[in-house]
Each structure stands twice: as C-alpha cells, then as structure tokens.
Amino acid sequence: MTKRLPREQRIVEVLRTLARETRKGRYQRAPVYEGPFSHRASPFMELVSCLVSQRVRDEQTTRVCAKIFAEATTPEELRALPLPRLERMLYGAGFYRQKARTLHALSEAVIEQGNVVPQTREGLEALPGIGPKCANLILAHCFGQPTIAVDTHVHRISNRLDWVRSKTPEKTEQTLTPLVPVRWRARVNILLVAHGQLVCRPIGPRCDECSVAPLCPQRGLRRRP
Ligand code: SF4
C-alpha cells in the first residue's frame, strides 16, 4: 500500500528508513563506512579516494587508499611520491598507470591553487580526473552543499525503487535532484551506497531482508517464483 505514495513521499520515506537503520548500526560493515577515508580527513583525501574508486570495487579502493594515505595525505606529499612507487600502490585498482599519472597531475593542480580544493562544481570538474560524480561527492561530503553524487549504486537503486527511469547516471542525477528535498540531498549517496553494498547488491539483491521493501516495486528485477 505504501508503494502508492507519491514519488517524492516514497523517496523521503526510504531515506528516513535507511538513515534510521544506519543509526542502529545495520550498515556499519559497509565498505563505504570503513577504510582510511571514512573519517573524511580532508577534501584532498576525498578527491584522491574518489579518483582511485573509478571502475574498481569498493574493497579495492579501501585497500589502495590505506596504502597511499599511510605515506601521503597532502598534495605536496602525494606529488613527491615517485611515479613507480605510486603505480605499485595502485596495482589492482584498474588502470593503475593512468591513475598514478592523474594523481600527480591532480596534486599539482591543487598545489597551483594554493593547496585549496575548489568549492564549486566547475572548479572541481576542471581538476584532472574529476567528473560530475566526484565533484558532487566532494561538494556534499566536504562542503555540505545539497548535491547528489550518482554512482553505480545510486543509479541502480534509484531505478529499482522506480524513483527514476533512466539509462545513465547523468540522467538519473538530473531527474532525481529536484525530487529530493534539499535537506536530504547530501546524504543520498552515502545512504544508497551502503545499502547497495550490503543489501541491494548489483547481483543477488537481498530483497527478503530489505527494510525498504514495502516501498519498492523492484523495477527491473525478475520476480520471485
Ligand atoms: S526491495 Fe530489493 S530491489 Fe528494492 S531496494 Fe530492497 S533490495 Fe533493492
């Protein structure tokens, strides 16, 4: 019955439920809440972890970032790491040679701006390797701006919940943003990523254990027998 609520109300209900479950500790094992960048030490570290995470599993991102942050947490420290050493740290995180070069370029760009990470989407997207998802993530997590970072988890779950019907993350962001109240937007990514890592997984979603199942039409999933 709750499924028939207007879409905006369903969205808020789902976000409230996930936030409540998070407070109770249900998602504490999610990789997004673990690892060296879970404490949000600095915007620069968020930039680095975001770049490392591209096209790689969350667990790999955590492992690789732990190695990098053990030796470098500032743009100067990262730029000073020799390229071959950085490549070895990134090995296993997909396109490791390219990512090592991009991390050096990113460090240089931030150093050139006085070691300040930009606080606008345009400024962030002008940095090497940073696209719309990373820019929105930094704006929301580090600067408290009401943006929605749409990664594969947010894109997939938003479609399953029938919040949007879109084929690309970009289109999902465009459609979803005006539907989510401003006060919730910055939390959409972290809530849905944790949910996607533990429950609404890409393959084999655990609908039987899902706290938002009454609000979900499971769009695109094969119906259970
Ligand atoms: S009911 Fe299934 S498809 Fe819907 S959000 Fe939960 S796990 Fe995902």
Image: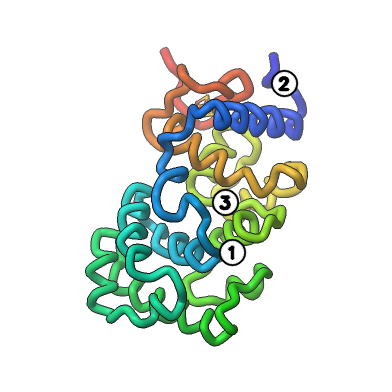
Which mark is drawn over residue 150? 3
Give the side of residue 12 with respect to residue 41, left or right.
Answer: right
Q: Residue at x 55, y 39 (%)?
A: 192
Element under disc 3: loop
Image position, residue 75 (x, y; %): 46, 77
Work out whether residue 102 or residue 151 is closer to the camera in this orientation and state it: 102
Element under disc 2: helix
Determine whether label 2 and label 3 are within 8 Å by CB: no
Image position, residue 222 (x, y; %): 44, 25
**Label 1 belongs to which residue?**
135
Work out whether residue 176 or residue 210 is closer to the camera in this orientation and state it: 210
Work out whether residue 76 or residue 182 is closer to the camera in this orientation and state it: 76
Decide: few, some or many residues near mark 1? Use Cα within 10 Å; few <14, some 14-19, many ≥20: many
Counting residues from the N terminus, which is met first, the one under dot 1 or under dot 3?
1
**Label 2 belongs to which residue?**
4
Q: Residue at x 54, y 87 (%)?
A: 112
Q: CA distance from mark 2 to mark 3?
A: 25 Å
Q: Amino acid at mark 2?
A: Arg
Give the side of residue 151 with respect to residue 19, left or right.
Answer: left
Image position, residue 90 (x, y; %): 29, 65
Determine whether label 1 and label 2 are within 8 Å by CB: no
Establish if 74 lies above or below 94.
below
